[in-house]
Image (cartoon, rainbow, N blue to C red):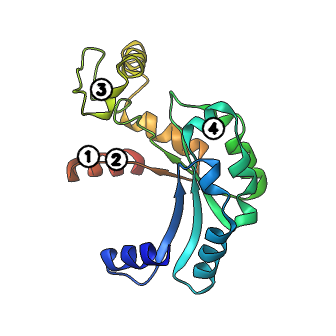
Amino acid sequence: MMYDLQETLASLKTDYLDIYYFHSGNDEFFFNDSIWKFLNKMVKEGVIKKLGLSLNHGLVKSGSNKQLLAAKDYGISIVQTVLNLVSKEALEFVIPYCKKEGLEIYGRMPLAKGLLSGKYSSTSIFSENDPRGKDPKMTEQILTKVSNEQKEINLKYALQWALEHSEKIVVGTKTPEQLLGVVSAVSK
């Protein structure tokens, strides 16, 4: 673990990380006291500023909240969860629990891999290599929803909706133009 952390710091050319996430893992990997002991030591030494838990969306959908319930015991202060106009499962337990416990909430995938950006329609076709092409039924459902609610769903609306339910959002972009579009949409 120390080697992985040192490699990350070297790759990023820094001596500390703002947030170190446990990302989308299962309970078997999460409940490892020695890892959390090490990570909390790194927090005390200033190598890591905050520990985060990026919840596996399958666990959220199934209502398995063991990791979330143990978050504070492991020194975790930030919880990241899938949160968008189509995937609202986190509104049922995760977000209310985080608010009650004083855990920061970061909504990830607010644009559902770009499908809620207004850029695509129900006739859009994605290759099998594209994550949106791997689950064509889900992609079709999302794009049909966007088509049916064209006036309501667009980049700005989708981002603002996610921000209403979380403190911050995590948005993936592929180009500087997309990044500027996201910044512009949330700045107005």
Q: Position of residue 7 (x, y in %)?
A: 37, 76
- For label 1, the crowd category at 10 Å Cα-Cα, with few meaning under 14, some 14 to 19 and many 20 or more, is few
Categorize mark 3 by other alpha carbons within 10 Å: few (<14), some (14-19), many (20+): some
Which is in the foreground here, disc 2 or disc 3?
A: 3
Identify the mark at residue 182; answer none if there is no mark.
Answer: 2
Disc 3 and disc 4 in contact, CB within 8 angstroms: no
Residue identified by numbered label 4 = 60
Q: Can you tell which of label 1 and label 4 is closer to the viewer?
A: 4
Label 3's element?
Answer: helix
Graded by Cα atoms within 10 Å as few (under 14), some (14 to 19) or many (20 or more), the crowding at tag 2 reads some
The answer for how far apart the CA atoms under marks 1 and 3 are is 20 Å
Q: Quadrant of residue 153?
A: top left
Question: Which amino acid does the dot numbered 4 rest on?
Answer: Val
Residue under the point 57% across and 80% down: 42
Q: Nearer the viewer, residue 28 or 22?
A: 28
- Circle 1 — which element? helix
CB atoms of marks 1 and 4 within 8 Å = no
Q: Are marks 2 and 4 in contact (CB under 8 Å)?
A: no
Instruction: Give x and y (percent) for residue 74.
Output: 70, 65
**Residue occupied by mark 1:** 178
Work out whether 10 lies above or below 179: below
Which residue type carries mark 1?
Answer: Gln
Q: What residue type is labelled 2?
A: Val
Residue 36 visible? The answer is yes
130 sits to left or right of 60: left
**How far is disc 1 from disc 4 in space, using C-alphas?**
29 Å
Residue under the point 37% across and 44% down: 185
Q: What's the distance in space between the residues labelled 2 and 4, CA to CA? A: 26 Å
Of the pair 137 and 106, the residue shown nearer to us: 137
Question: Residue 133 has which mark?
Answer: 3
